[in-house]
Amino acid sequence: MFLEKAIDEMTKKNKVVIGFDLGNSTSQISLCRVEQSMPDTVSLVAGAEEYNIPTVLCRRMLEEEVKNGSQTVRGLWAMGKEALQLYAQKQGVLVEDLLLLAKNGVKVQVGEEEFDAEELLEVFLRKCFGLISSYARVEDIICVMFTLKDMNAEIMKRIKNIMERIDAGRTQVFFMSHEDCFYQYMIHQPEEMWFHDVLLYEYRADGIRSFCMSMNRNARPIVAFMESELFPQMKMTEVSNMKAEQKTAFFRQLDDAFMEIAREQCEGKNVTSVFLLGDVFSKEWCKESLRFLCKNRRVFQGNNLFSKGACYGAREKVAPSSLSKDYVYLSEEKLKANIGIECNRGGQKIYQPLLDAGISWYDARKEIDFILAKHNGIPLTVVPLNAGRKRIAEITLEGLQVRGNRTNRIGLSLYMEDADTVAIEIADKGFGEFFPSTGQVWKERLSIEQISKNA
């Protein structure tokens, strides 16, 4: 046992985990070794804090040919800042909205060629991993935690497909919301920064999004909660064409609006730390707001918190610390029920857990095989957290003949489509050469909310 643990620790030494904040307009990448205390963020300029990677590609439309094995490639892809520069010099065709295009699964016309949107996103991700190679060996990467503004099942599926092609499944791939990244980042900071409430303001294209994290320290483990709100009235307007007095008036109005938001959110709370994310925050316009927030509070400004939080989260996945036992974050994206099945093993009736309450819905997945003894039904046990009483959800395998001699082997696969919906797929797997599979597949969906109401 001790030898296995020592070998496991040696294997993990010098291994790298990645936090990848993948955005539709810009992206960021943070990384750290498993034994490293703090993550580093990939910078586009060595020695500078230029963390934002434009999520764009540019297809060179020059008459150049590059030999790649037995293939001839016409035109090369550039990404990020280089792509924007090539486009500005009219040397290529720019492709924006890579994440949105991949989510919708569309075809994209680039010059005279057509590409799958997923293929374009793969080009971008491959080039991003090329940037990482300046910081660590790609073969040392054991886990990538992607964080997205919107946790969409379709885009997460496509990213997993891409990562499978990039490294043949060698690297574990997980997903984490921005809220969860904020939580992971905070609990890895000195406790005096988050012993009381913490506020985060993120400046986005659609306005300011606020996150307020608080702790219930009477619970064991200690439970973290997050309140989030969008303020669309805080959209930044292009001011370069404004006259000086117009610009001053606009900034004063923006400052007053942000001050009102901050006052309201700090009222009745013991906020000790405030984080301002985004380059739009500047002393040029939020003078009074900053003066208010800095009063008896620590205020931090930057733009790589989510990628660092994702990196901390990745490390907790592969090498859990005591923080994972002592603290838990409950969000709207967590599974709100325990799902399992009562079955027989070795002549004894046991409960086999399948999906545990508290896991993020996009990480909830289970595959397991069973032998049917008498009936063509699968009785799933569902215990909603807010109801406390178990309910049996019977799934009937219509058309399946149960032979009664324990030769009906079925494969059960469960995953979450969203925080409420459990997708279930059951396949007849046959029983060796004597009873080949019929190829039958049964699919069902369960609503946790509906089950809770009926429990």
Image (cartoon, rainbow, N blue to C red):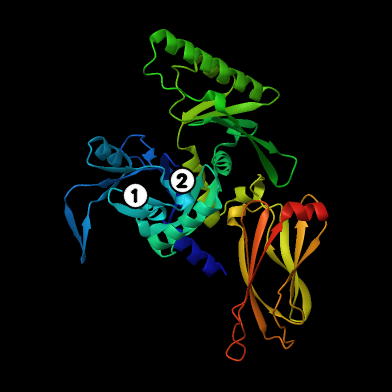
Q: Is residue 131 above or below residue 239?
A: below
Task: State the image coordinates of residue 267 (x, y, percent, origin top left).
Answer: 68, 22
At 50% across and 40% down in the image, what residue appears? 306
Which residue, given by chain and number where applicable, does mark 2 sit on?
100
Q: Residue 36, can we see it? A: no
Kind of residue sitting beneath label 1? Gln
Position of 240 compared to 68: left or right? right
Local packing at callout 1 (Cα closer than 10 Å; few below 14, some 14-19, many 20+) is few
Image quarter of residue 317: bottom right
Residue 360 x %, y %: 62, 52
Disc 1 from disc 2: Cα separation: 15 Å
Q: Quadrant of the N terminus?
A: bottom right
For the residue pair 236 and 107, the one nearer the viewer reads as: 107
Amino acid type at circle 2 is Leu
395 in relation to 142, above or below? below
User: Which residue was labeled with disc 1?
Assistant: 109
